[in-house]
Image: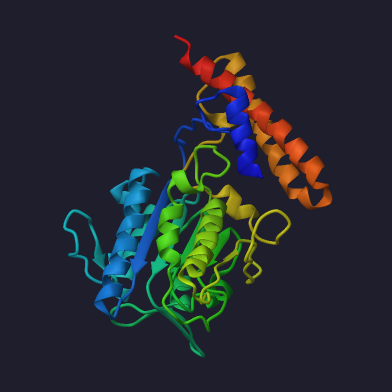
């Protein structure tokens, strides 16, 4: 329904820009960092797979979301896989060294994304990511997180048996995503492949604001993971969860009226300034930016109230708001193109 309404707006207004699109500028404060850790594969196919996913995530963060090499840390089983990509071996010592460096570098307005890939296990001693040498346990990771100052902490664990990381790491201003809904989902996962694809704005920028939120990324990954099992004719052995309200319990479908999703909606890959603090521009341009912000908030509110409305009322109001939003974006684009 929503995609159909977006297309209506394109047709009626003849806009070349995506509906709701904004041309954001980089914020002058706050830096985002990412630590990507791929564990041991065991078998050659999993070694290669872990490398492809971890290096692929590294590249999309660098190319699309403009993370610099100083903001990215890649730790893998074999760091010599590609000399062009700076990587370190994913041992507990190297992980600790990375967090020591981040502890010196990060400030309270910075964000940190931690992405885990590989095979995990969950026993009575807690959940772990299997790496060379001593494994990386959820409790050990939690201790490492205490070394850094941050605005938001995001932990994405795409490994098997990853759900217990929610219970161990949940807290204020933290978003935890896991590939599985329990420690008992022990089989190899495909979550990280779809998460890598989800980081691309082409796939996940559903509200067409020129950015990818953590919530959009999770929802794309969750849906594509389920589709993969359906296409393979296999029973799904992984069910992703997201927890961002600190209650140590994840949601399968966050957003709207679910307990989780509000923080994930605000967290975006590649620190961007909100519309209100972007470049000055004329009075007309500033008014249009404020109008776009207001319309986007009205759309978000309407979506949250969807269950209280009839389908006809919901689609009618949504279409009206989307048309107004598309028109405002056309006007804003025209002003930007004026000599």
Residue 85 x, y percent position in the rendering: 22, 55
Res 197 quadrant in image: bottom left
Q: Nearer the viewer, residue 231 or 190?
A: 231
In the rendered image, the residue lying farthest to the top is 339
Q: Residue at x 28, y 79 (%)?
A: 132
Residue 143 x, y percent position in the rendering: 46, 72
Residue 285 x, y percent position in the rendering: 58, 18
The answer, for residue 133, to whether it is visible in the render is: yes
The answer, for residue 146, to whether it is visible in the render is: no
Q: Residue at x 39, y 60 (%)?
A: 103
Asked if residue 302 lies left or right of residue 182, the reply is right
Q: Nearer the viewer, residue 142 or 19?
A: 19
Quadrant location of the C terminus? top left
In the rendered image, the residue lying farthest to the bottom is 124
Q: Which of 134 and 58 is in front in this view?
A: 58
Q: Residue at x 72, y 38 (%)?
A: 318
Asked if residue 110 lies left or right of residue 35, the reply is right
Residue 273 x, y percent position in the rendering: 51, 36
Q: Which residue is drawn at 60% across and 50% down?
A: 265
Q: How many marks?
A: 0
Quadrant location of the N terminus? top right
Compared to 334, does 106 lie above or below?
below
Asked if residue 235 lies left or right of residue 80, the reply is right
Res 88 quadrant in image: bottom left
Res 299 quadrant in image: top right
- Coloured how? rainbow
Compared to 73, does 23 lie above or below?
above
């Amino acid at each position: 329904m929503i995609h159909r309404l977006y297309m209506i707006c394109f047709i009626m207004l003849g806009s070349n820009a995506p509906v709701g699109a904004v041309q954001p500028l980089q914020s002058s404060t706050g830096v985002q960092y990412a630590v990507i850790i791929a564990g041991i594969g065991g078998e050659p196919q999993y070694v290669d797979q872990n490398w492809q996913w971890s290096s692929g995530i590294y590249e999309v963060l660098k190319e699309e979301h403009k993370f610099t090499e100083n903001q990215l840390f890649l730790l893998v089983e074999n760091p010599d896989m590609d000399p062009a990509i700076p990587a370190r071996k994913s041992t507990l010592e190297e992980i600790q060294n990375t967090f020591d460096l981040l502890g010196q570098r990060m400030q309270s307005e910075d964000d940190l994304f931690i992405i885990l890939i590989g095979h995990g296990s969950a026993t009575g001693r807690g959940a772990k990511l299997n790496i060379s040498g001593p494994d990386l346990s959820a409790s050990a990771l939690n201790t490492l997180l205490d070394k850094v100052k941050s605005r938001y902490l995001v932990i994405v664990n795409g490994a098997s048996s990853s759900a217990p990381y929610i219970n161990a790491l949940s807290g204020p201003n933290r978003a935890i995503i896991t590939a599985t809904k329990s420690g008992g989902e022990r089989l190899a996962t495909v979550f990280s492949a779809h998460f890598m694809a989800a980081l691309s704005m082409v796939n996940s920028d559903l509200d067409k604001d020129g950015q990818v939120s953590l919530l959009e990324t999770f929802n794309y990954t969750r849906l594509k993971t389920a589709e993969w099992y359906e296409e393979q004719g296999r029973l799904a052995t992984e069910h992703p969860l997201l927890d961002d309200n600190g209650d140590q319990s994840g949601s399968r479908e966050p957003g709207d009226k679910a307990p989780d999703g509000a923080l994930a909606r605000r967290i975006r890959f590649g620190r961007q300034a909100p519309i209100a603090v972007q470049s000055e521009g004329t009075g007309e341009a500033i008014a249009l930016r404020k109008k776009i912000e207001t319309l986007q908030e009205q759309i978000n509110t309407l979506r949250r109230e969807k269950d209280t409305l009839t389908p006809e009322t919901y689609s009618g109001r949504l279409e009206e708001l989307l048309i107004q939003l598309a028109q405002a974006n056309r006007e804003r684009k025209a002003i930007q193109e004026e000599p």
